[in-house]
Image (cartoon, rainbow, N blue to C red):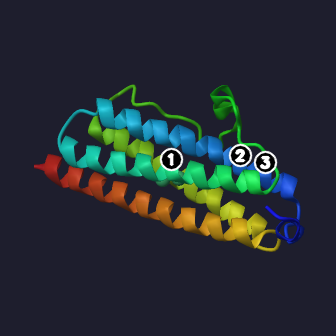
Amino acid sequence: MGTKGRSIVKDADKIVEKLNKAFADEWLAYYQYWVGAKVIEGPMKEAVIGELDQHAADELRHADMLALRIIQLGGVPILDPKQWHEASNCGYHGPADPNVRVVLDQNVKGEQCAIGVYTELMEFTRERDPITYNMALEILQDEVEHEEDLEALVQDFEILTAS
Ligand SMILES: [Fe+2]
Ligand SMILES: [Fe+2]
C-alpha cells in the first residue's frame, strides 16, 4: 500500500494482529468444511455436502482477502500452519463424528463465532481503518448467510427425521 494509503490507518500493527487471527480462523474453517464434506454420513447427505463445499470455497476466499489486507498494511500473513490453532479465535472442531446433524451443529457454532469476530473487527476499525472496516463488513455478510444456510438445513433435518 502506498504512503498516503497507510497514513489514513491508525494502529496498523494491532489491526494486522487481529487480521492474522481471523486469517487462522478462515483456514481452519475452510478445512473443517472441506473435510466434513468428505466424511459426512446420514440423511440429506448430498444437500449438505453441496452447502459445505460452497462454504469451504467462501472461507478460502476470505483467507485470501485477509492475507492481501495484511500485506497492504505492512504485515506478514501467518507463514506456518502450526500457528493456526494458537492464533485462532474460533478453533477447530473436526468431524470425528461424521453424523450430518453433529457436523451441521459444529459448523453453526463456528459461524456464530465468526460473526462475533467480524463484528468486533468492525468496531475496532470503524474509526481507525475504513478499508479493513469495509472488508470486515463484506465478510460478515457471508458469515451471516452461512449461519442461516446451516440453520435451514438443521430445520429440514429435524422435519425429515421427526416422523
Ligand atoms: Fe469466513
Ligand atoms: Fe462462514
Which amino acid is tagged 2?
Asn
Mark 2, secondary structure of its residue: helix
Q: Amino acid at mark 1?
A: Leu
Cα distance between the residues tagged 3 and 1: 19 Å
Q: What x and y, as percent, mark residue 152?
A: 30, 59
N-term mark: 3 or 1: 3
Q: Position of residue 121 (x, y in %)?
A: 70, 61
* Residue 135 figure quarter: bottom right
Disc number for residue 20: 2
Is residue 121 toward the left or the right of residue 90 in the image? right
| Residue at figure coordinates x 49%, y 59% from the top left | 143
Residue 149's quadrant in the figure? bottom left
Ligand 1 within 8 angstroms of badge 1 C-beta: no
Question: Where 136 falls versus 29 (above or below)?
Answer: below
Disc ID at residue 60: 1
**Hey, what amino acid is under mark 3?**
Glu
Q: Position of residue 138 (x, y in %)?
A: 56, 67
**Extreme residue toward the front, this view:** 2
Q: Farthest residue toward the left? A: 163
Q: Residues within 10 Å of mark 3 (few under 14, many from 20)?
A: some
Is 138 placed left or right of 154 in the picture? right
- Along the line of sight, which residue is nearer the eye, 146 or 71? 71
Total marks drawn? Answer: 3
Q: Are marks 2 and 3 in contact (CB under 8 Å)?
A: yes
- The answer to whether 78 appears left or right of 58 in the picture is right
Per the image, the residue denoted by label 3 is 17
| Front position among marks 3 and 1 | 1
- Residue 64 rendering spot, x and y as whole percentages: 58, 50
Q: Is residue 46 left or right of residue 154?
A: left
Q: Is residue 65 above or below residue 34?
A: below
Q: Nearer the viewer, residue 44 or 35?
A: 35
